[in-house]
Every structure is written in C-alpha cells, then in structure tokens.
C-alpha cells in the first residue's frame, strides 16, 4: 500500500471515529451503535470514496451530512 492511500485511510478512520463519538454523545447511545448507524449510510459510503475528498472535511461537516441524510433532506445533503 502506498503512502498516499495510507494517509487517506487514516483520515477516513479519524473522521468516522469522531463523527461516531459525536453521534453517541448527542443521542446518548453506545459508540459502537453510533458507528454501526453511521456505517449504514450513504454519507459513510461517500467518506470511504477517496475521490469525494470528504475525508478532508471536518467531523462537524460530515455530521451535518449524516443528519441531513437521516432527516431525508437530500437537498441539504447535496448542498453540504
């Protein structure tokens, strides 16, 4: 695995972990449950797509996308 790919994967892991922590704290659920919920979303799929560059955005930005998706607010999700 090349250095760039490792860097992308590290960023993806950091953002996903932080978003899951934020969901867990806000929704008063276990971090593993928060991560499971996140992993079932299109937002998470986009986070794993290196070409989307979502891994370079903040956890707050990604959480906003997650929340828009959960509300079914696709216009907001696309805007973010």
Image (cartoon, rainbow, N blue to C red):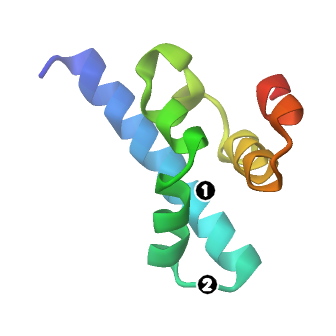
Q: Is residue 67 above or below residue 49?
A: below
Q: Quadrant of residue 23?
A: bottom right
Q: Residue at x 33, y 27 (%)?
A: 7
The quadrant in which the N terminus is found is top left
Disc number placed over residue 19 in the picture, else none: 1
| Distance Cα–Cα, label 1 vs label 2 | 13 Å
25 or 73, nearer to the observer: 73
Q: In the image, residue 16 lies at what x, y percent?
A: 50, 50
Q: Crowding at label 1, few (<14), some or many (≥20) Cα neighbours within 10 Å?
A: many
Q: Is residue 1 above or below residue 59?
A: above
Secondary structure beneath label 2: loop
Q: Which residue is mark 2?
A: 29
Q: Crowding at label 2, few (<14), some or many (≥20) Cα neighbours within 10 Å?
A: few
Q: In the image, residue 20 lies at what x, y percent?
A: 56, 63
Left or right of 57 on screen, residue 27: right
Q: Is residue 35 above or below residue 28?
A: above
Q: Quadrant of residue 9?
A: top left
Q: Residue furthest front?
A: 72
Left or right of 21 on screen, residue 74: right
Q: Residue at x 48, y 37 (%)?
A: 45
Mark found first going from the N terminus, 1 or 2: 1
Q: In the image, residue 18 lies at what x, y percent?
A: 56, 57
Secondary structure beneath label 1: helix
């Amino acid at each position: 695995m090349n250095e760039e790919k490792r860097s992308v994967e590290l960023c993806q892991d950091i953002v996903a972990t932080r978003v899951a922590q934020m969901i867990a704290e806000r929704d008063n659920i276990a971090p593993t449950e928060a991560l499971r919920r996140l992993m079932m979303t299109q937002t998470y799929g986009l986070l794993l797509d290196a070409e989307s560059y979502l891994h370079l955005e903040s956890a707050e930005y990604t959480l906003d996308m997650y929340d828009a998706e959960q509300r079914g607010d696709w216009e907001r999700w696309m805007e973010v």
